[in-house]
Amino acid sequence: MTVPTEHILALAAILFGIGVAGFFTRRNVIVVLMSIELMLNAANLTFVAGARMHSSEGALNLDGTLFTIFVIAVAAVEAAVGLALVIAFYRRKQTVSLDQVNELKD
């Protein structure tokens, strides 16, 4: 049994919407970074669904999968750099609230 492509795209849209909502409503840096990761994973689902939809029965289309691997690599770098910034910010200010970010000038 295979899952219809429309269901995969609907799931990707829901995940992306949750990520956008988390990005705009939360003030915690860690939650914002997790929301960005959720949006990137929704984009990955869309790439895989698109590759699956455009592949013919006999041929294998790897374009969406290659884009997905590239996005996963970018997300890993983003997570590593983001976490390093969060740790440095926490050591300096003892908080991870985005309201304190504009006070990094001192």
Image (spheres, helix red, strand yellow):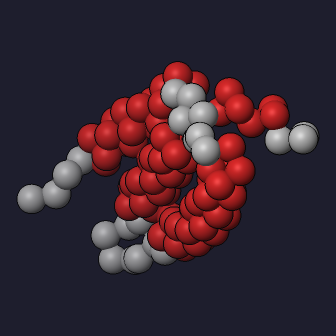
Q: Quadrant of the N terminus?
A: bottom left
Task: Tell which residue pokes out farthest to the right in this image.
Answer: 105
Residue at image position (65%, 33%) is 98
Position above or below: 19 against 94:
above
Position above or below: 34 against 71:
above
The quadrant in which residue 27 appears is top right
Decide if residue 5 is on the left or right side of residue 65. Answer: left
Decide if residue 57 is on the left or right side of residue 63. Answer: left
Q: Nearer the viewer, residue 7 or 89?
A: 89
Residue at image position (41%, 65%) is 55
Q: Nearer the viewer, residue 56 or 12?
A: 12
User: Can residue 59 be seen?
Assistant: yes
- Percent across and percent down for residue 104 are 83, 41
Q: How many marks?
A: 0
Decide if residue 43 is on the left or right side of residue 56. Answer: right
- Percent across and percent down for residue 45 are 41, 53
Residue at image position (59%, 40%) is 95
Q: Quadrant of the C terminus?
A: top right
The quadrant in which residue 83 appears is bottom right
User: Can residue 20 be seen?
Assistant: no
The quadrant in which residue 23 appears is top right
Residue at image position (68%, 27%) is 99
Task: Tell which residue pokes out farthest to the left in this image.
Answer: 1
Q: Nearer the viewer, residue 56 or 41?
A: 41
- Percent across and percent down for residue 79 are 57, 61
- Percent across and percent down for residue 84 are 64, 63
